[in-house]
Amino acid sequence: MNCTPLVLALALFTTVGASAQGTTAPTKTAASDTKATTDPKAAATTVTVDHTCFLASNDATWKSVGTSADVTARIKTIQEKCKADCSALKATDTSGAKQAGAMNSSIKTIQDLLTADQKTKWSNWCKVSGPKPVK
């Protein structure tokens, strides 16, 4: 079953629906990963990643960011859960606020897994190589 059209439609819908509320999720790192805990700079790092880039980030993205296979697998699980949650919310969340909240929460959870350097690389990938948000 090809889910690409569904993912693209979800990305477009949630980005457009959430644009009035802002499509970025600045977050702070929590100490949920050993790397984040041992890197004193990680706690102070805040990066911005929009919903479109969050949905488009894939294995190649995470390889370029430098995540381990374990962290990449955890990130993919978070992304898949978010996509499923947003699909379920789509029918009842006409404003897109709950979907945007689910994405922001997922982005924060992913950033909690990354070191400060990885967060910066992901943010830079989004700016340079990632898809641009729909306005």
Image (cartoon, helix red, strand yellow):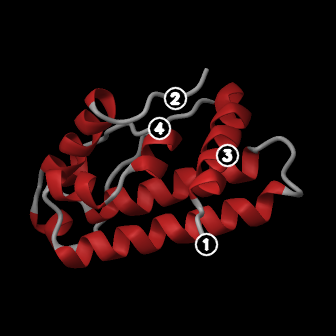
In the rendered image, which residue does mark 1 sit on? 1
Determine whether 93 is above or below 78 in the image.
above
Q: Give whichever of discs 1 and 2 has the lower sequence position.
A: 1
**Callout in the foreground (4, 1):** 1
Determine whether 129 is above or below 100 in the image.
above
Q: Secondary structure at mark 4?
A: loop
Contact check, label 4 and label 1, Cβ < 8 Å: no
The residue lying furthest to the bottom in this view is 70
Among the 4 quarters of the image, the one containing residue 112: bottom left
Q: What residue is at 67 percent from the left and 43 percent from the top? A: 14
Q: What numbered label is drawn on residue 133? A: 2
In the rendered image, which residue does mark 3 sit on? 9
In the image, 116 versus 1, the foreground residue is 1
**65 lies left or right of 12:** left
**Callout in the foreground (4, 3):** 3
Q: What residue is at 58 percent from the left and 65 percent from the top? A: 2
In the image, 98 versus 37, the foreground residue is 98
Q: How far separated are the C-alphas under marks 1 and 2?
A: 26 Å
Q: Give whichever of discs 3 and 2 has the lower sequence position.
A: 3
| Res. 65 visible in picture | yes
In the rendered image, which residue does mark 4 sit on? 50
**110 lies left or right of 10:** left
Q: How far separated are the C-alphas under marks 4 and 2?
A: 7 Å
- Please state, as top left, top right, bottom left or bottom right, where the N terminus lies in the image: bottom right
In the image, 62 versus 42, the foreground residue is 62
Identify the amino acid type marked 2.
Pro
| Res. 32 visible in picture | no
Among the 4 quarters of the image, the one containing residue 22: top right
